[in-house]
Amino acid sequence: MGAPYREATRTRSTAEFVSKIEGGRQELEATMYWLEVLGDSEVMNAQPATAGALVPLHAETNELMAIRTACARNAKGRKESL
């Protein structure tokens, strides 16, 4: 998830920044979906070595989503106040 954020930091405008951040959020949504598919299919839980591995991945994905959401919200707020 670092690549979309890096792209966002190199933008020329607030609108472009928000667009890149929101694009990264879409990728996080896709990641969350695939983590849920893995969990529902029990592919990961079938192997003792990977059982429970999805829990921290899901938590980190949620944290990254919250960070990206805050970034977009703050940038939009700054744009409106200018």
Image: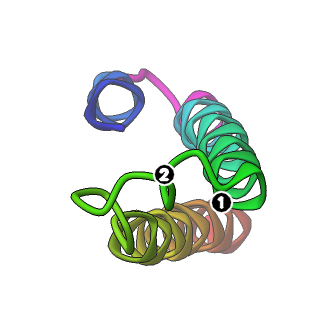
Which residue is drawn at the image coordinates 34% and 74% (left, top)?
56
Across and down, in percent, residue 53 comes to 34, 65
Instruction: Decide: few, some or many residues near mark 2? Use Cα within 10 Å; few <14, some 14-19, many ≥20.
Output: some
Q: Name the residue under label 1.
A: 39
Q: Mark 1–mark 2 contact, CB under 8 Å?
A: yes
Q: Give the range drawn in magenta.
A: 11-16
Question: Which amino acid, by three-letter code, is at mark 1?
Answer: Gly
Q: Which structural element holds mark 1? A: helix
* Residue 22 or residue 36, whichever sits in front: 36
Q: With respect to residue 28, does 74 lie above or below?
A: below
Question: Magenta stretch: residue 18 in it?
Answer: no
Which residue is drawn at the image coordinates 48% and 51% (left, top)?
44
Question: Magenta stretch: residue 14 in it?
Answer: yes
Q: Mark 2 points at which residue?
A: 44
Which residue is drawn at the image coordinates 22% and 58% (left, top)?
49
* Residue 37 or residue 51, whichever sits in front: 51
Q: In this view, does 23 lie to the left or right of 74?
A: right
Across and down, in percent, residue 67 comes to 44, 71
Mark 1 or mark 2: name the one nearer the start of the chain: 1
Q: Which structural element holds mark 2? A: loop
